[in-house]
Amino acid sequence: MSTVTEQAPKQEQRSLAKRLAGANTLWIGLVLLAVIVVFGAINPTGVLNLFNFQQLLIETAVLLVLSVGMTFVIVTSGIDLSVGSVLVFSGVTSALTMNAMCGGDSTNGGWGVVIVGGIVAIVSGCAWGVLNGLLIAKAKIPPLIVTLGSFGAALGAAELLTGGSDVRSVPDTLRDSLGFGTLLGGVPTMVIFAALVTAIGAWLLSTTRFGRYTYAIGSNEVAAQRTGISVTRHLVLVYVLAGGLSGLAGFMSLAHFTTTTLTSHSTDNLNAIAGVVLGGTSVFGGVGSVIGTVIGVFIPAVLSKGLTIIQVNQFWQPIAVAIVLVAAVWFDQTRRKARNQR
């Protein structure tokens, strides 16, 4: 009898979380549509064309992979400021490994070299995820402090490994396949790769036990512990997932830019957080969806692209994104207060 009584509130809580996530996704989808309509009305031929759409997809592919991992972290009411630096570190370890396998120049490296490079990138990211997860879940250090430390440490480690200079030698096979290749009649491989990662992330969060535990911890960590969820273990796994996806994003970036781009990812963590929050994932935890994150990631991307096309000063772009981000958090807080007062 008690088991049935305990299960009812949990089912009701999961149902509420799904309804809130659905409402968030609908709302943010309408915002994205409104942004596209506005820019399309201002400059129809410059904004609404296939080339710009394709470029937009390619430019957001790496950020989308980062943001999928960030979604899981923020749903647990955590944060990960280290993803951009972990991306750089993973790209460096991957590039150095591939070069070492090819005697110092991996340009002619084959698929074996590429596969090993990809594995090294993901494992490197997971290693930072393990460190972050243990410090947060076991040592009980706030996620903001832990991942801020990892942000500096991962970037510093990458610069130590390379002497502060970018690694510019990657296999042509990697560049021509993942970096600039196309599949399915011309769809960029980078976009397909990001779409697959997103689909797996959406399935994992919305339909599996792992996803249910993630929501439960974000809603009420103490209650989750009392229902038998190993909160420590699960939080470590969530940060490992975020780190692994950061490593994968680093490998994708290496393939596309054919260099480690040490100084080009300093704001990736903030962009990923912005995309997740704009997508309706609550900064207070317990509510969110990967589908919402997809839409959220595209809002700042469309804003930046649209403002560039209509020739607005580039310095207005971060201001526009910041306004939309603050508005999204304010909306989340207002809705949460209204729900708690019922």
Image (spheres, helix red, strand yellow):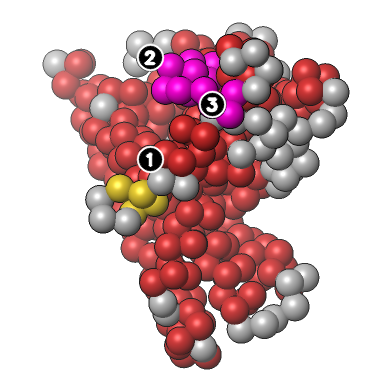
- Location of residue 84 in the rendering, given as x and y in whole percent from the top left corner: 66, 36
Residue with the mark numbered 2: 229
| Amino acid tagged 1 | Phe
> Which comes before the other along the chain, label 2 or label 1?
1
- The residue lying toward the viewer, choosing from 187 and 133, is 187
Q: Quadrant of the N terminus?
A: top left
Q: In the image, which residues are magenta? A: 106-120
What separation in Å lies between label 2 and label 1 (alpha carbons)? 32 Å
Residue with the mark numbered 3: 108
The kind of secondary structure element at disc 3 is: loop
Q: Nearer the viewer, mark 2 or mark 1?
A: 1
> Which comes before the other along the chain, label 3 or label 2?
3
- Location of residue 207 in the rendering, given as x and y in whole percent from the top left corner: 24, 33
- The residue lying toward the viewer, choosing from 303 and 210, is 303
What separation in Å lies between label 3 and label 1 (alpha carbons)? 23 Å
- Vertical order, 19 against 230 (above or below): below
113 inside magenta stretch: yes
| Amino acid tagged 3 | Asn
Q: Nearer the viewer, mark 3 or mark 2?
A: 3
Residue 311 visible in the snapshot: yes
Q: Nearer the viewer, mark 3 or mark 1?
A: 3
Residue with the mark numbered 1: 193
Q: Are marks 3 and 2 in contact (CB under 8 Å)?
A: no
